Each structure stands twice: as structure tokens, then as C-alpha cells.
């Protein structure tokens, strides 16, 4: 059985989840080819940093209110939070090495 290191978030869970220390959230859509290409990179990072960084993803098609609140206009879009506060944002397809910096 595959272990899931990236939590699939709903709008209701989002506010609580981003308060759990350091959190990287992947804002995506199922139809977005670059988002699909980023999935294995995010999953690998989540596995590597398990216990240090929490990883979540939220589908903007179903949770447009959350996307709008955080100014998500392009996807893939990755937002880094620390204790609920947005500290960094990355837009587009990004190599794993750039995340690790």
C-alpha cells in the first residue's frame, strides 16, 4: 500500500492545516498539464522532508474561494506557510533543487 505524504485538502481543512509549522501547499487543477508534471516532484519532496515540512494540495476548481483569498491566479502555484503565515510563493513548473534552496 502506498503511503500518502501529501494531504488532499478541502477549504474547511485548509486554515487548520497551514498552522501546523512549516507547510508547502500545491494549488493545482486536474486538467493542468504542468501541475500533473509537478506531482511526482512534490511527492518526492514530501517523502524526503516527512516530519519536517507538511505538504498539502488543494484543487482550485473545487476550492476557488481559498485560491482567491491567497491570490492564486496561475497554476501550478506553491505557497510556503509558517504557522499560518505566507512566507514564500513559487509559480510554475519548478525543479526540485529550487524548492530545496
Image: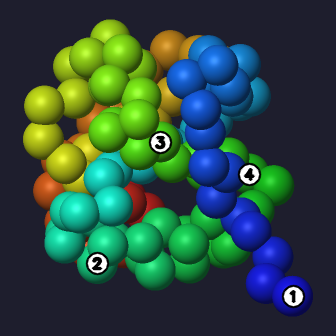
Q: Is residue 72 visible?
A: yes
Q: Residue 52, labelled with which disc? A: 4
**Separation (CA) of disc 1 from disc 2:** 23 Å
Sequence-wise, the earlier of marks 1 and 2 is 1
**Separation (CA) of disc 1 from disc 3:** 23 Å
Q: Residues within 10 Å of mark 1 (few under 14, many from 20)?
A: few
User: Residue 6 at x, y = what percent?
Assistant: 64, 59
**Separation (CA) of disc 1 from disc 4:** 23 Å
Q: How crowded is mark 2: few (under 14 residues within 10 Å), some or many (20 or more)?
A: few
Label 3: element kind: strand
Is 77 situated left or right of 85 in this image? Answer: left
Point 19% across, 72% down: residue: 33
Q: Residue 37, labelled with which disc? A: 2
Label 4: element kind: loop
Sequence-wise, the earlier of marks 1 and 4 is 1
Sequence-wise, the earlier of marks 3 and 4 is 4
Point 23% across, 63% down: residue: 31
Label 2: element kind: helix
Q: Is residue 87 visible?
A: no
In the image, residue 96 sits, relative to residue 32, either above or below, namely below
**Separation (CA) of disc 2 from disc 4:** 24 Å
Is label 1 in contact with label 2 (beta carbons under 8 Å)?
Answer: no
User: Residue 70 at x, y = what percent?
Assistant: 31, 18
Sequence-wise, the earlier of marks 2 and 4 is 2
**Separation (CA) of disc 3 from disc 4:** 20 Å
In the image, residue 10 sits, relative to residue 32, either above or below, namely above
Q: Which of marks 1 and 2 is in front?
A: 1
Quarter holding the C terminus is bottom left
Q: Name the residue under label 1.
A: 1
Q: Name the residue under label 3.
A: 58
User: Residue 85 at x, y = what percent?
Assistant: 50, 15
Quarter holding the N terminus is bottom right
Amino acid at each position: 500500500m502506498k503511503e500518502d505524504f501529501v494531504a488532499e485538502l478541502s477549504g474547511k481543512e485548509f486554515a487548520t492545516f497551514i498552522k501546523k509549522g512549516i507547510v508547502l501547499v500545491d494549488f493545482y487543477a486536474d486538467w493542468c498539464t504542468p501541475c500533473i508534471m509537478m506531482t511526482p516532484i512534490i511527492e518526492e519532496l514530501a517523502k524526503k522532508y516527512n516530519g519536517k515540512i507538511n505538504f498539502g494540495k488543494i484543487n482550485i476548481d473545487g476550492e476557488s474561494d481559498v485560491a482567491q483569498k491567497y491570490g492564486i491566479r496561475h497554476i501550478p502555484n506553491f505557497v510556503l506557510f509558517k504557522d499560518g503565515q505566507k512566507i514564500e510563493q513559487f509559480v510554475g513548473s519548478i525543479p526540485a533543487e529550487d524548492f530545496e534552496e
